[in-house]
Image (spheres, rainbow, N blue to C red):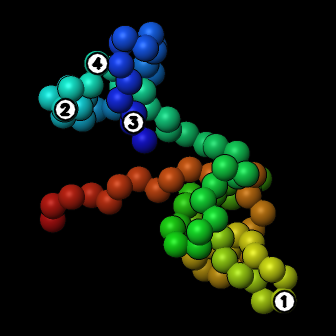
């Protein structure tokens, strides 16, 4: 996720985006851009059950979603139906555009 920031606020941006995206944001009036990519603690992951995320658990990387687990409350379940206990997560990238 890239966030616009103002020079007036004294922010120092971390820029990790393509030149095309940088130009789009500049045209939108951004003074600086801060990007937050990478692994985040699982405690900060969305638990709305609506969105798959990329999860990491001791060498396993896969897609998972927070959902009810039969007779066990809620938990992280992969797209193949396995329950996992990840320690980190990150959003999935945007899908490719075009054909």
Residue at x 63%, y 55% (from the top left corner): 45
Residue at x 50%, y 53% (from the top left corner): 91
Of the 4 image quadrants, the one containing the C terminus is bottom left
Q: Position of residue 57 (x, y in %)?
A: 73, 56
Residue for badge 3? 2
Q: Residues within 10 Å of mark 1 (few under 14, many from 20)?
A: few
Left or right of 2: which side holds 96? left
Residue for badge 1? 71
Disc 2 to disc 4, C-alpha distance: 9 Å
Residue for badge 2? 28
Residue for badge 4? 31
Dot 4 or dot 3: first in sequence order is: 3
Q: Residues within 10 Å of mark 2 (few under 14, many from 20)?
A: few
Disc 1 to disc 4, C-alpha distance: 51 Å
Dot 1 or dot 4: first in sequence order is: 4
Disc 4 to disc 3, C-alpha distance: 13 Å
Residue at x 51%, y 68% (from the top left corner): 51
Of the 4 image quadrants, the one containing the N terminus is top left
Disc 2 to disc 1, C-alpha distance: 49 Å
């Amino acid at each position: 996720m890239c966030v616009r920031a103002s020079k007036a606020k004294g922010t120092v941006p971390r820029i990790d985006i393509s030149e095309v995206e940088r130009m789009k944001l500049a045209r939108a009036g951004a003074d600086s851009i801060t990007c937050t990519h990478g692994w985040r603690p699982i405690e900060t992951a969305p638990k709305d059950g609506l969105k798959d995320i990329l999860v990491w658990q001791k060498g396993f990387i896969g897609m998972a979603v927070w959902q009810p687990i039969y007779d066990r409350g809620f938990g992280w379940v992969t797209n193949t139906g396995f329950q996992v206990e990840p320690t980190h997560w990150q959003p999935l990238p945007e899908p490719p555009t075009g054909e």
